[in-house]
Amino acid sequence: MENAKPLQKTTGILLLIVALCVMLWQIVIIYSSGMQHVTHGLLLIAGVCVPLMLGTYLLTRSLPEVASRRRAVHASLLALFVFYRAALLGALIFSRVDYLNFAETHAD
């Protein structure tokens, strides 16, 4: 079991880095070109939440103290909340939704 902890920690950190990179990439896309389709929101869930949750889970399993586990979870939730607020602001204020294509897609 002790042999798996460094692997869990490394995998957790890599997944968190992937999630943060996807967050930054998506924020740039939302603010530059807007949310073009509803599936963009679903891809955000898959691209951000899954690696973030799995990375946090693996990282916290490898940490020895309860306090450090709580800090890791709080930092993860804070990063997700900040991303959510930035994406929401971008989607509601700065995004240019293509209503014509959205209506056509919905009609299909």
Image (spheres, helix red, strand yellow):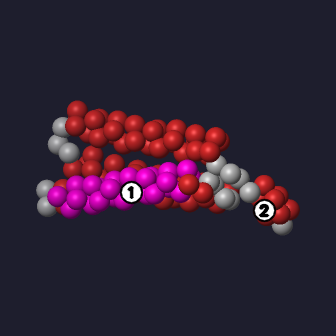
Residue tagged by mark 2? Answer: 101
Outermost residue to the top: 67
SS at circle 2: helix
Task: Judge whether residue 82 can be spotted in this image.
Answer: yes
Question: Horizontally, is 42 left or right of 15 in the view?
Answer: right
Which amino acid type is marked by label 2? Asn
Bounds of the magenta segment: 6-31
Identify the residue at horizontal 62%, vertical 45% (top origin).
94
Instruction: In this rendered view, identify the residue nearer to me: 105 or 36.
Output: 36
SS at circle 1: helix
Question: Horizontally, is 72 left or right of 64 in the view?
Answer: right
Magenta segment includes 26: yes
Question: Horizontally, is 105 left or right of 47 in the view?
Answer: right
Q: In which image quadrant can residue 107 be found?
A: bottom right
Give the numbered dot on residue 21: 1
Instruction: In this rendered view, identify the residue nearer to me: 37 or 50.
Output: 37
Image location (x, y in percent) of residue 8: 24, 58
Number of numbered tags placed on the structure image = 2
